[in-house]
């Protein structure tokens, strides 16, 4: 447990305590904070409260749009898979 009481994997401090600078990497990346839709740095929101990391503010601001696009693509892929499976080609 670290100083903020959330454990070492919450995005505050060195995430795993190994001194590899992972907290520094987080500080250079951007996140989308779910509770209010703001674009923030890692130290402004706990890991469970954010999406990311993203390489820049503009991409982080599109987090929900990106998630929606990825979900739609995965759903299409699932439908395609299901259609192939019902065509009688399975095993």
Image (spheres, rainbow, N blue to C red):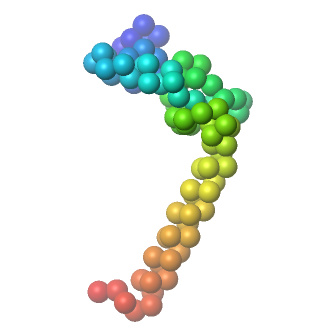
Q: Residue 17's x, y, as percent? A: 31, 17
Q: Residue 21 occupies which quadrant of the picture?
A: top left
In this view of the protein, which residue sits in the foreground, 65 or 21? Answer: 21
Q: Residue 64's x, y, as percent? A: 65, 45
The answer to whether residue 63 of the structure is visible from this angle is yes
Q: How many marks?
A: 0
Image quarter hosting the C terminus: bottom left
In this view of the protein, which residue sits in the foreground, 61 or 1? Answer: 61
Q: Residue 1's x, y, as percent? A: 36, 14
Is residue 89 rendered to the left or right of residue 44? left
The answer to whether residue 35 of the structure is visible from this angle is no
Q: Residue 16 occupies which quadrant of the picture?
A: top left
In this view of the protein, which residue sits in the foreground, 49 or 44? Answer: 44
Q: Residue at x 62, y 57 (%)?
A: 69
Q: Residue at x 70, y 29 (%)?
A: 38
In this view of the protein, which residue sits in the foreground, 54 or 87? Answer: 54
Q: Residue at x 53, y 75 (%)?
A: 79
Residue positioned most to the top: 3
Q: Is residue 68 above or below residue 26?
A: below
Is residue 64 rendered to the left or right of residue 26? right
Q: Residue 39's x, y, as percent? A: 66, 29
Q: Is residue 57 above or below residue 71?
A: above
Q: Residue at x 63, y 54 (%)?
A: 68
């Amino acid at each position: 447990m670290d100083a903020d009481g959330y454990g070492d994997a919450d995005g505050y401090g060195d995430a795993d305590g190994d001194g590899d600078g992972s907290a520094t990497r987080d500080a250079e990346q951007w996140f989308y904070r779910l509770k209010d839709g703001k674009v923030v740095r890692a130290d402004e929101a706990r890991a469970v409260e954010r999406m990311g990391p993203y390489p820049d503010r503009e991409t982080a601001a599109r987090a929900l749009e990106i998630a929606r696009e990825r979900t739609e693509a995965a759903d299409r892929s699932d439908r395609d898979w299901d259609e192939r499976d019902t065509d009688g080609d399975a095993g």
